[in-house]
Structure formats: C-alpha cells, structure tokens
Image (tube, rainbow, N blue to C red):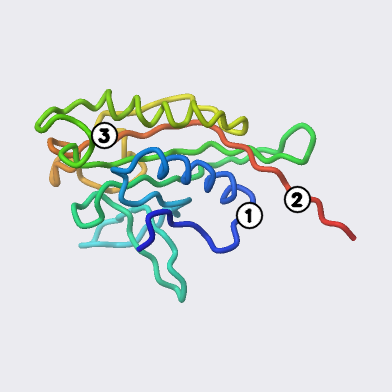
Amino acid sequence: MDRIVTRTNPKLFDKEVYKIQKALADALPWLDHVFGICESLTDIKEGRKFTSANLYRGRGKYEQIMPCAELGNFAFFTLRDPQEMGKNKMLIKSPFSLIVWYDTRKVSLPLDERNTEEIKGQILGVLAATRFSNMAITKIYEKPQNVFSDYSYAHTDNQYLMSPYAGLRIDGYIEAYIPCIEQ
C-alpha cells in the first residue's frame, strides 16, 4: 500500500486534500499512511449497525480504515454535510475532519513518554506552515469518545486510544474551486 493514498485523477476536494496529504507525509516521517477522503459506510456486524471509515479500492471492494497495529500510524479525511456554494459560485465549501491515529512508541519522542501535545504541535505546525488559504481549522478533539465519534469503534473494548496509542481529530472547513467547462 502506498504511503500517500489518493485517487488517480483527483478533482474538487480530492485535489485540495492531496496538497495536505503531501505536506503531512513530507513533514511527518512517522506517518505510515496518509489516506485521502474516506467514505463512511454502515453494515451489520453481529446483528448491530457498524459504521466505519472506508477507502474504495475498485471493483466494489472497500478497505476499512480503523485503528490497528498492522495499518500503522495513519491519517485520513472525511467530508461532512452540508457542502455550500461560495458567493462567487466558483467555490464549494465543506466541513471536514482530519483524523490521525498513531503509536507513541514509533514517533520522535523519548521512549515511554506520552507527549500528545508534541504530536498535536507537529501536525498543526505543518498545517500552519503550508498556509492553505482554502482551509480553516475550527476544532480539535482528543478525548476517545470524540476522535472516532462518527464510527462504531468501541474504544472501551479495544483501548485503541490508550498508551501506547493515541489519536486526534481536527475539524474545519475546506474549499475547492469548481473548474470552468469551456464549450
């Protein structure tokens, strides 16, 4: 699996998210995978609804993106409804979330020090340094019940946000330019 996972022909938000993916991958070598925009899918597992983040792999196949040691340290994006048209009708604006999950033993920290503020600072530093004019950060979540709140990941059962693992969710808005179609 590639380190930066994106569409082969990105358009609209995929193009804007790719710029952020590349900046994160370039600046944070401890990220094993930087996924693009994932879809939220719900199916039935053990008789209960189960919602997860998924990456479409083609031919009707999806890959679930969820905390696990095999996947390594990762980041992915989701878009939220509603998306709004800009005032000049050439922009579309969407709420987004950037979710990052990592093993603290594999990032550039002293061993056995759970310095999540260091990692949050690194991520926010990358986002600030790149000066994405089409993105604004509005909220940051770190509590286990909030990081993956859109998904059915049972943090109390799996302890995927307990040492040595950690995660955070950054919410905000992102804008994409609508291409002109020449006739």
Label 3: few (<14), some or many (≥20) within 10 Å? some
Vertically, is 41 above or below 29? Answer: below
Task: Please identify the quarter of the rendering in which residue 145 is found.
Answer: top left
Asked where in the image residue 1 lies, by quadrant, the reply is: bottom left
Which residue does the numbered mark 2 point to in the structure image? 179
Residue type at tag 3: Gln
**Which quadrant of the figure has residue 181?**
bottom right
- Residue at the spot x=34%, y=28% of the render? 141
- Amino acid carrying mark 2 in the image: Pro
Dots 3, 1 in contact, CB < 8 A: no
Q: Position of residue 152 (x, y in %)?
A: 28, 48
Helix, strand or loop status at disc 1: loop
Q: Position of residue 64 (x, y in %)?
A: 33, 59
Q: Which mark is residue 145?
A: 3
Q: Is residue 103 rendered to the left or right of residue 97? A: left
The disc at residue 11 is: 1
x 22%, y 36%: residue: 166
Cβ atoms under marks 2 and 1 closer than 8 Å: yes
